Image (cartoon, helix red, strand yellow):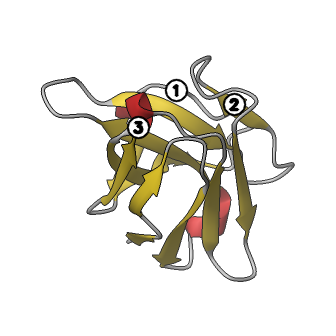
Amino acid sequence: QVQLVESGGGLVQAGGSLKLSCAASGRTFSSRAVGWFRQAPGKEREFVAAITWSDGSTYYADSVKGRFTISRDNAKNTVYLQMNSLKSEDTAVYYCAASLERYADYARPDSYEYRYWGQGTQVTVSS
């Protein structure tokens, strides 16, 4: 089993930065890809970024490419999402998720590829 807890959300002005953390418990976390997703009010959940378990290959949605950076520290069982140049349209609840498959050499943007989900953290960007 893997349990995930997000933190680091809050209220920030447009152009500002936040760093989200996803802390995991469970011995298999380090062997799973991790993704960040977000859901804004009235909208469907969407992919933000993902990172593989091993070589740290990263993937980003076009809307955040160049502004957000995903990273992981397997020794601390934690994945981070550094968010810079925030825009009002980044306002959403952000979720981290760990993949269903272990030891995969890819990290997919599809939510059904992820088995374990955190409870989410609110990010609000004021314009």
- Residue 2 visible somewhere in the drawing: no
Spatial separation of the CA atoms under disc 2 and disc 1: 8 Å
Crowd band around label 2 with a 10 angstrom C-alpha radius: few (<14), some (14–19), many (20+): many
Q: Residue at the location (41% across, 33% down)?
A: 88
Residue for badge 3: 127
Whether the residues at callouts 2 and 1 have beta carbons within 8 Å, the answer is yes
**Identity of the amino acid at label 2?**
Tyr
Residue for badge 1: 109
- Left or right of 64 on screen, residue 55: right
Q: Residue at the location (80% across, 53% down)?
A: 54
Crowd band around label 1 with a 10 angstrom C-alpha radius: few (<14), some (14–19), many (20+): some
Spatial separation of the CA atoms under disc 3 and disc 1: 28 Å
Q: Secondary structure at mark 1?
A: loop
Q: Secondary structure at mark 2?
A: strand
Seen as rendered, the residue at the extreme front is: 127
- Residue 73 visible somewhere in the drawing: yes
- Left or right of 13 on screen, residue 105: right
